[in-house]
């Protein structure tokens, strides 16, 4: 990115990071400190205690519930103070909140109540049965947060410290300029020489393909699609170049989440910045969320920017 590029920064005054004292939340804490320090923003460190002690495989805790809860709370408070001191050592003024409940909803409630500008949370990177059973606080945050969400994958490995490639998935009716501004917001001067890959995925869901045949609708060739995409995003490309980014546009066929994750691995991407439509109810159950699947599989940091909500009644 050109050192002379001028970027209008919207201003980021508060960052919330959710921690559970695991390795992935430690990475999230580091990235949150970076973002807060860069923007001279305050930071809120939040830990959520379970509503009640849980048995493990049916074995009850040795300590009585009140004693166990007290010990856990005391230890959590101590760890939060340690993180607060680490943040202060990096020049970041941080507050801590210890709350009780389910991690996802509690983080969202806190983010709303504190009106934070960005939520940072670690992603476990779970797949298969583990993901089905344990779920993901990161994916819940992506779906429900009132602000942009930066998820940090366990394999991130500090790549946001010296980023080289960011992927911005695009739609024909979207504007990737906002994603470019947020990338600069989060990374600041670290975006020097950063390449932004605008990625369009041409995909017709399998459930619709028989209908296209029955209706006699022929799919447009990939070259024509590529031409249309480049023409449509040309103004946005010009805006990103004006911000100082090197920009490449790529059109690929395939299911979006898979294509995005594959390109992230192939390009060794440091960050994916994408819109999420925040589907709820039946729409989410049927269609899911591309962003949530990318968070699960991409293997790098993902910035979810909230677009229009798609709700449906059940």
Image (tube, rainbow, N blue to C red):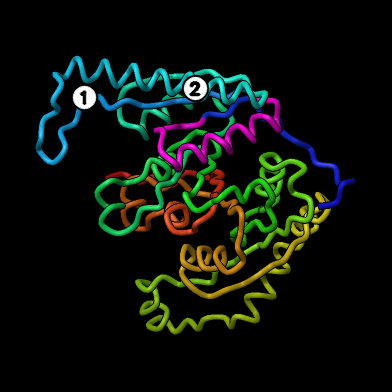
Which SS class for mark 1?
A: loop
Q: Is residue 42 left or right of residue 146?
A: right
As for residue 19 lying within the magenta part, the answer is yes
Q: Which mark is residue 82?
A: 2
- Quadrant including the C terminus: top left
Q: Which residues are magenta?
A: 17-41
Q: Residue 226 appears at what percent x and percent y?
A: 66, 75
Q: Is residue 181 at all visible to an observer of this figure?
A: yes
Of mark 2 and mark 1, the one earlier in the sequence is 1
Residue lying at 13% horizontally and 41% vertically, measured from the top left: 57
The answer for how far apart the CA atoms under marks 2 and 1 are is: 24 Å
Q: Which of pointers 2 and 1 indicates the residue nearer the eye?
A: 2
- In the figure, 215 relative to 94: above or below? below
Residue lying at 47% horizontally and 56% vertically, measured from the top left: 294
Task: For the residues labelled 2 and 1, say whether their Cβ atoms are less than 8 Å apart.
Answer: no
- In the figure, 118 relative to 246: above or below? above
For label 1, the crowd category at 10 Å Cα-Cα, with few meaning under 14, some 14 to 19 and many 20 or more, is few
How many numbered callouts?
2
| Front residue of 289 and 301 | 301
Residue lying at 57% horizontally and 29% vertically, measured from the top left: 15
- In the figure, 169 relative to 255: above or below? above
Q: Which residue is mark 1?
A: 52
As for residue 67 lying within the magenta part, the answer is no
Q: Residue 82 appears at what percent x and percent y?
A: 49, 22
Q: Is residue 54 left or right of residue 113?
A: left
Q: Is residue 173 at all visible to an observer of this figure?
A: no
Q: Main secondary structure of the magenta part?
A: helix
Q: Which mark is residue 17?
A: none
């Amino acid at each position: 990115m050109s050192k002379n590029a001028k970027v209008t920064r919207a201003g980021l005054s508060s960052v919330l990071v959710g921690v559970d004292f695991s390795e992935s939340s430690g990475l999230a804490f580091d990235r949150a400190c970076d973002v807060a320090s860069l923007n001279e923003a305050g930071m809120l460190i939040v830990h959520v205690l379970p509503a009640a002690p849980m048995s493990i495989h049916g074995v009850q805790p040795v300590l009585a519930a009140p004693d166990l809860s007290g010990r856990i709370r005391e230890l959590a408070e101590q760890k939060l103070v340690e993180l607060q001191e680490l943040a202060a050592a990096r020049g970041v003024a941080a507050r801590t909140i210890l709350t009780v409940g389910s991690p996802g909803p509690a983080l969202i409630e806190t983010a709303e109540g504190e009106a934070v500008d960005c939520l940072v949370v670690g992603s476990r990177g779970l797949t298969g049965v583990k993901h089905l059973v344990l779920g993901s606080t990161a994916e819940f945050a992506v779906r429900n947060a009132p602000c942009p969400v930066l998820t940090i994958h366990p394999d991130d490995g500090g790549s946001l410290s010296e980023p080289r490639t960011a992927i911005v998935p695009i739609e024909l009716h979207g504007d990737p300029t906002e994603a470019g501004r947020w990338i600069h917001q989060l990374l600041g001067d670290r975006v020097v020489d950063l390449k932004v890959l605008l990625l369009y995925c041409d995909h017709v869901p399998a459930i619709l393909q028989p209908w296209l045949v029955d209706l006699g609708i022929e799919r447009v060739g990939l070259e024509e699609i590529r031409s249309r995409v480049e023409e449509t995003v040309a103004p946005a490309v010009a805006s990103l170049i004006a911000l100082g980014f090197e920009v490449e546009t790529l059109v690929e066929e395939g299911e979006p989440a898979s294509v995005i994750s594959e390109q992230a691995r192939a390009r060794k991407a440091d960050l994916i910045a994408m819109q999420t439509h925040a589907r709820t109810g039946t729409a989410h159950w049927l269609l899911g969320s591309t962003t949530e699947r990318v968070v699960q599989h991409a293997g790098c940091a993902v910035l979810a920017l909230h677009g229009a909500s798609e709700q449906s009644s059940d």
